[in-house]
Amino acid sequence: MKTTPKISRLFSFGLLLATTQVSLAQTANLNVQSLKLKNGLTVLALEDHAVPTVSYYTVFKVGSRNERPGITGLSHLFEHMMFNGSAKYKPKVFDQIIEAGGGSSNAFTNSDTTEYFEDFSTQTLDSVLLLEADRMKALKLDKANIEQERGIVKEERRVNTDNSIPGSMNELLENNAFVAHPYRWDTIGFMKDLDAITLSDAQTYFKTYYAPNNAVVAVVGDFNAKTLFAKIKTYFEEIPSQTPPRPVVNSEPEQTGEKRIVYHRTAELPAVTFGYHTISYLQADDPVLDLLSVILTGGESSRLYKTLVYEKQIATYVGASNDSRIDPGLFVFSAQVREGHTTAEIEAAVYAELDNIAKNGVTERELQKAKNGQLIGFQKRFTTNNGRAGLLAEYEALRGGWKNIGDFLPKYEKVTIDDLKRAAKTYFSDRNRTVITLIPEVRAGDVKP
């Protein structure tokens, strides 16, 4: 086996420490300027004149957790409708103007937020401000618009959930792990609810959740902040604020026993996914659980990948993720069974490894490797205009303010092996577990995937 010379190992570790210090200095010294309009809109600006480009990022504090039975999927439906015109701009004009400026736009919806972002040339900034202000003030909402996007979202559900084994298993996990909290439905929504959403539902939802006082905007790149703020006041301040949305109540009861769901559908091989109730990303153990997920399945050298895929050869794939959210989420495992083996073998191997970590911990090398991965991921996001704009807007909207970005790396760096042992013992209890087991079958007329 090839070994790394000691001097190279020392150099790598020294480089890591130096990079960490640079990152912390960067976050501590960000020259961010802020503006709070009378209507409640929060705007953050960070000038960077290295290249003539700008990123504009908006976080609306609304996601599937703000929905209710009957309108599930509406947040994601809005993600699509926000690009279909407004009072002053026809459909497709938004993309045409940004693309003409050498840029692009996109958006995503999750359980907690809906986020929009554009990257474009400096000279396009004023046009983007006008576009963004008009769609926040007067988005085009009519039956034709809703029907068009309803069809697109329903097809997205068919592809990614109904006709996807991993997607449908993940939805079953959420449906059964949660009994009271809105996290029990997926962001895509239920098909019948997508059919039932009305124009009135959409209009009420827009007025409530897409109001300026429910949004944070971050602009990063080549511009003058003073000029930017003057234009934002001109374009956005006339948009009226709205009554703040009702807070989401975390009414999820404690789970007091394992739940098991057997899932029958056309498939080649068995599979299993299971989740443990954990915590919010605002709680102290969140970095500990993030690092555990990396140690367990982060790459081919991770513990479970080596054990299940290479050594025992009982799985073709194994993954784990700390799915933390505003309210307590799940720590999820998933695995595809190798032919000739069973989901019971996979479960036993995973549970044994979790018990092993709870009793014996991990090596210093494993912990440092996981920390290095968090550092690199942070660095990659922090070195682009879009990445910094997203961090600023998300931290300001959800994590107590943008200045808390500086706490990201220290929270991971201070995690110890004892923390990992304690977390494994605390959260990975069979009484806190929901298991979805796929049983393959072929029905008459079915075509194997």
Image (cartoon, grey):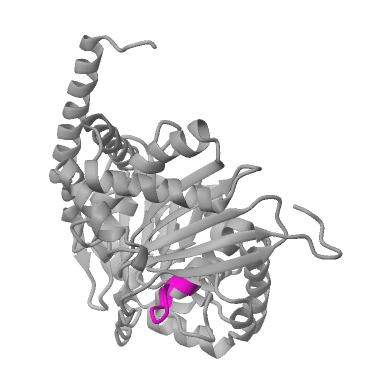
The reply to whether residue 423 is visible in this rendering is yes
Specify the farthest residue to the bottom: 200
Q: Quadrant of the N terminus?
A: top left
Residue at (35, 79) in percent of width and height = 239
The image shows residue 140 at horizontal and vertical percentages of 55, 77
Residue at horizontal 31%, vertical 34%?
A: 50
Give the vertical position of 420 relative to 80 (above or below): above
Quadrant of res 397: bottom left
- Left or right: 201, with 302 as reference point: right
> Is 132 part of what is drawn in magenta?
no
Which of the 4 quarters of the picture holds residue 261? bottom right
Left or right, 301 with respect to 20, comes to right
Question: Residue 383 at x, y = what percent?
Answer: 31, 38
Instruction: Return the residue nearer the eye: 376 or 77.
Output: 376
Residue 183: image location, x then y, percent: 42, 73
Of 223 and 169, the residue lying toward us = 169
- Please name the residue shown 63% across and 77% down the image: 191
Q: Residue 374: name its quadrant.
A: top left
Q: Residue at x 42, y 74 (%)?
A: 178
Q: Can residue 82 be seen in the rendering of this structure?
A: no
Against 133, is 125 above or below? above
Q: Which residues are drawn in magenta?
A: 176-183
Residue 371: horizontal and vertical position, in percent? Answer: 26, 38
Q: Residue furthest right?
A: 445
Task: Give the number of marks.
Answer: 0
